[in-house]
Image (tube, rainbow, N blue to C red):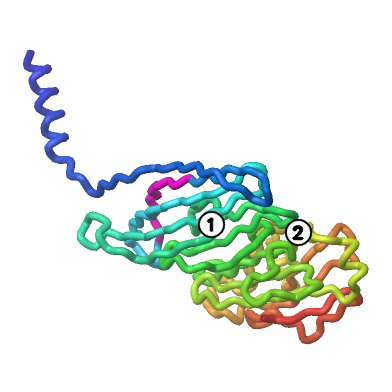
Amino acid sequence: MKTLTLLILLIATQAFAQKKHFADSAYSVVTIDRDTVDGYEQTLTRRTTQSYHQQVYWEDIHSDHPVDLLISERNVQEYYSGAEGEMGWIALTGKISDKGQFDKTLWHDSIEANIINYNYEYFESVLYGCCASLEAHQLFRYLDGKPMLRLTSPLYTVDIPNTQQKRLIGFLDNSAAQGYEDCNDSMMAGVLTYVDTKTLARQRLVINFKDAQLYDSLGVEMFTKIGFSPSQPKDIENKRNDADLTLWSVDGIDNPNGFSNFTIDIYLTDDKSLMVKVPVKNDKLDISRMKSKYFTFSLR
């Protein structure tokens, strides 16, 4: 009997000690409307859902105190029966615990997207492909919710070990790049983006075809992979894969100019004659000596 009494007392004590840190509630809603488009009856379905994601991030690599972030996600999706694609908008709000109950709004944004994926270092919006355009991803920082880059390719990285210096690299296919920001080139192959994760300084290399016939024959989805070609022996020796490059030749040197002595190799097709090699010098995409029989290059 004494053991049972003690157990009940312990459970009661723990329950009393627990304090509610945060609580919220919301409804998920679906509406279905009928409409007539070009003489055909269609249904428009609209789904609204509310969810939350908790994430820990560090403001810098030297911080001993991680920041606890709560992200509120309100997702609205619409689609017509018999039509291709799904339209979506997602409102995100990031809150931190100023007084212990996620009572301080850090940032807010509304994004055209279908889903949000949460990764360790960033979160990404996904906009489904439609009508011959590829699925596009956009990466954002937890720190302030600001966008870093948009891409249809996998993500590639270059970093200087034992520093905070890191660069993200991605390729945006012409089907998803058209109309994005100032990219409206009529014979565009795609856009390479190179971004500083700390300052958000971005460089974009726009690649355009010279010949309309070649452009028409290759069409959309013109991308195979990105690779890196370092020139320093230490970087060549320690290169492990094509997705990430670590510059051990400048280990511990916290200087952006350390991003030098390598090229970003863009394989647009399996035909190596169409590969584009982009030199990086002092943290800049250096196109001053880039020449191609098939392409023109410009920085935006």
Q: Which residue is mark 2?
A: 225
Q: Secondary structure at mark 2?
A: strand
Q: Quadrant location of the N terminus?
A: top left
What amino acid is found at the position of numbered circle 2 in the picture? Lys
In the displayed structure, does residue 68 sit left or right of residue 49?
A: left
Residue at (87, 61) in percent of width and height: 218
198 magenta-colored: no
Give the magenta part as a residue range: 47-57
**Decide: marks 2, 1 in contact (CB < 8 A)?**
no
Q: Quadrant location of the C terminus?
A: bottom right
Above or below, 294 against 133 in this view is below
Instruction: Kindly report the secondary structure that dominates the magenta region of the rendered protein.
Output: strand
Say if residue 261 shows up in the picture: no
User: Tag 1: Cα neighbours inside 10 Å, few (<14), some, or many (≥20)?
Assistant: many
Residue at (61, 65) in percent of width and height: 150
Residue 155 in picture, x, y percent from top left: 64, 59
In the displayed structure, does residue 98 sit left or right of residue 245?
A: left
Above or below, 201 against 34 in this view is below
Residue at (41, 65) in percent of width and height: 143
In depth, the one of 39 and 211 nearer the eye is 39
| Residue 264, disc | none
User: Tag 2: Cα neighbours inside 10 Å, few (<14), some, or many (≥20)?
Assistant: some
Residue 261 in picture, x, y percent from top left: 71, 77
> Which one is earlier in the sequence, the residue at label 2 or at label 1?
1
In depth, the one of 31 and 265 nearer the eye is 31
Q: Which residue is mark 1?
A: 124
What amino acid is found at the position of numbered circle 1 in the picture? Glu
Q: Quadrant of residue 170?
A: bottom right
Q: CA distance from mark 2 to mark 1?
A: 20 Å
